[in-house]
Image: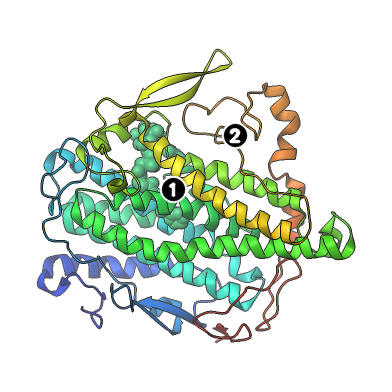
Amino acid sequence: MELDAKIPNNVNLSSEPKLQRALEKWQPRFLDWWMDMGPEGFQKDDVYLRTAISVDPAGWAHYDYVKMPDYRWGIFLTPQQSGRVIGFGDNQGQPVWNEVPGEFRTQLRRLIVTQGDTEPASVEQQRRLGKTAPSVFDLRNLFQVNVEEGRHLWAMVYLLHSYFGRDGREEAEELLDRRSGDRDKPRILGAFNEPCDDWLNFYMFTMFTDRDGKYQLLALAESGFDPLARTTKFMLTEEAFHMSVGETGVGRIVDRTAQLMREKKDDDVRKHGAIDLPTIQKYLNFWVSVSSDLFGGEISTNAAQYFAAGLKGRNREESYDDHKLLDSFYSMEVSKEGRLVTEEIPLRNAMNEVLRDDYIEDCQRGVDRWNKALEDAGLSDRLKLPHRRFHRQIGIYSGLHFSPEGVPISEEEWKRKRGEWLPTDEDQAFVRSLMHAVTEPGKMASWIGPPRQGIKGKPLEFEYVRKA
Ligand code: BYC
């Protein structure tokens, strides 16, 4: 471990002076970007953050007050597994690569750049949320997510600098040049250009968009390019926290709404300063659909090539029997002249859909837990995941219209019903009207319940963020 180095790392960076110099040159540019595009208005405050200090599962996290610009963004890979072989595709059984194979260089670089681009994008999307945090506890969690997204960017930049020479360095520069939502230089993937400017959006984003991150990272953790597999495995440990922020955040909003619905015997909790279930449902519909798009097209030759080459596998590839998939098929509902018909798609071409299946199942488990809280509160209302065809911009269902149940509908019906299914300007204005910072430790905004526990055994009243 080189924990005290300028760039903390467990990759023995000091033994590669050229690489170290290149990364040390990138570091001030990263910090400039962080000051410009990172959390606005809190850079001088002390935040009770966890920092990675080892990849040992028992003790990698260290908690202390840190000013965010001083966060020790480090490069951490899980230990190399000796004798590891490629687990799938045409090269199955061959030793994994520790250098980039020439014939797959472009594809690998593209995967790493796409993944890397999402990390700073999310920090940009969330940069103003600190000003309206519903509690000091939530404020700290936002910043924890933000610094870890910054570390994930470092993880991808390390791979670009280390394995892709000059074009890798250029890509690393561009990762700091693109901007979420910018018309001229947007981030690469759709969801990362959507505004995430209120806390209902933030929790939905960390619940559903970060969960896409989990599945993409799980697929990359299977990669035959060993440094990518080892990097993404470690990132997954951080990703788990982000999703828990989302799931418990939405859960606490649902708790509060349910409590008011019962106490006031009124479904319209807006007048009591909380968020009504139909509005929560609309935000859910929006973020599930844009996050589903992040898996790419249902039928994708890119995905087939990634699988064939051994670059990107399935979630927990070892849980499958067949790792070549040369004569397997996926039954997919495809739209033909306005009707849905089932087609058999060669499985390699359906890899994005296979990963999306696992994602949807995982999302459903979270929604079930929210519904359990509604049930426990004695309410009959339930939240529902929209169908995978609903409101898609990428893939075979884009350009067509479907209800949240997945039933094909006309454009006229879509236009008529859209406001019942997705947040309207008025819904967003209402949610925004609730967003006011609560700065007294232990207190919560009117629209959200308290968390079940504090951070690292600290009480809820702990001063998780100390103003400078
Ligand atoms: N928006 O063959 P197709 C995370 C493009 S999130 C815009 O269908 P393919 C995080 C695609 O690039 C995880 N464009 O799909 C979460 C291609 O373009 P070209 C991020 C899109 O190639 C929260 C064309 O459409 N990780 O970590 O299989 C906070 C046809 O592509 C979109 C990764 O993405 C879209 N949604 O790509 C922080 C993993 N979808 O070639 C972080 C790496 C597709 O026609 N990336 N396109 O110009 C990949 O594995 C793949 O690139 C994709 C799907 C999963 C994105």
When the figure is inspected, residue 240 is found, relative to residue 71, above or below; the finding is: above
* Ligand 1: image quarter: top left
Of 271 and 359, nearer the camera is 359
Q: Quadrant of the C terminus?
A: bottom right
Q: Splitting the image into 4 quarters, where does residue 405 fall?
A: top right
Q: In the image, residue 69 lies at what x, y percent? A: 42, 76
Is residue 181 in sight in this rendering?
Answer: no
Q: Residue furthest right?
A: 265
Q: Which residue is mark 1?
A: 187
When the figure is inspected, residue 20 is found, relative to residue 383, above or below; the finding is: below
CA distance for labels 2 and 1: 23 Å
Left or right: where does residue 141 sit relative to residue 221? right
Which residue: 24% across, 27% down? 326
Q: Which residue is mark 2?
A: 390
Q: In the image, residue 437 lies at what x, y percent? A: 68, 73
Q: Amino acid at mark 2?
A: Phe
Q: Nearer the viewer, mark 2 or mark 1?
A: 2
Q: Residues within 10 Å of mark 2 (few under 14, many from 20)?
A: many
Mark 2 touches mark 1? (CB < 8 Å):
no
Is residue 433 in sight in this rendering?
Answer: yes
